[in-house]
Image (tube, rainbow, N blue to C red):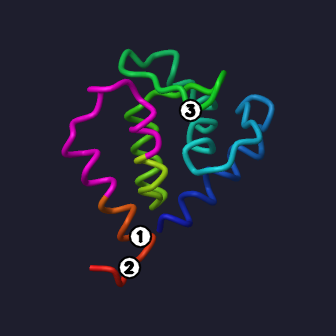
């Protein structure tokens, strides 16, 4: 399901590449941020905004949601870590870290 969600987001972003402002950065979090720009969630979002790269900002919680929905826990962890200190609950950071490690090495535990 995660791969299907990521493919759908990529199709939407590719169809409107100029409006999505997808730069050359790699990673699910950048594709998800471009999708959020297409949906213009940043305009009506009053919460925390995270800077992924210079000039590449996205609302934190919708971004984390899309990364998790795509099955990319490492991207969700990177996005959360890029937010200001104290923005995300430590338990969430620990959970995303654990899920990202498990995803990278499933037989480890």
State yes or no: residue 89 in magenta.
Answer: yes
Numbered mark located on residue 106 in the image: 2
Find numbered disc 1 in the image and state the secondary structure of the residue it sits on. Answer: helix
**Is residue 66 placed above or below 4 in the rendered structure?**
above
For the point 35% across and 70% down, which residue is it? Answer: 102
Q: CA distance from mark 1 to mark 3?
A: 22 Å
Find numbered disc 2 in the image and state the secondary structure of the residue it sits on. Answer: loop
82 sits to left or right of 26: left
The residue where tag 3 is placed is 52
The residue where tag 1 is placed is 103
Find numbered disc 3 in the image and state the secondary structure of the residue it sits on. Answer: strand
**Residue extending farthest left:** 91
For the point 32% across and 26% down, which residue is it? Answer: 85
Query: How far from the left and from the top, in percent, is residue 1?
Result: 47, 68
Q: Which region is colored magenta?
A: 78-97
Q: Are marks 2 and 1 in contact (CB under 8 Å)?
A: yes
9 sits to left or right of 14: left
State yes or no: residue 46 in magenta.
Answer: no
On the image, which quarter does residue 23 sit in?
Answer: top right
For the point 61% across and 50% down, which residue is it? Answer: 27
- Counting the numbered discs, the total is 3
Mark nearer the N terminus (2 vs 3): 3
């Amino acid at each position: 399901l995660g791969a299907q969600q990521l493919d759908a987001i990529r199709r939407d972003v590719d169809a409107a590449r100029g409006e999505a402002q997808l730069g050359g950065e790699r990673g699910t979090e950048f594709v998800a941020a471009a999708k959020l720009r297409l949906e213009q969630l940043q305009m009506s979002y009053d919460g925390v905004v995270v800077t992924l790269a210079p000039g590449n900002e996205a609302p934190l919680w919708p971004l984390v949601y899309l990364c998790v929905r795509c099955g990319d826990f490492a991207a969700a962890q990177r996005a959360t870590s890029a937010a200001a200190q104290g923005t995300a609950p430590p338990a969430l950071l620990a959970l995303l870290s654990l899920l990202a490690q498990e995803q990278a090495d499933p037989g480890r535990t």
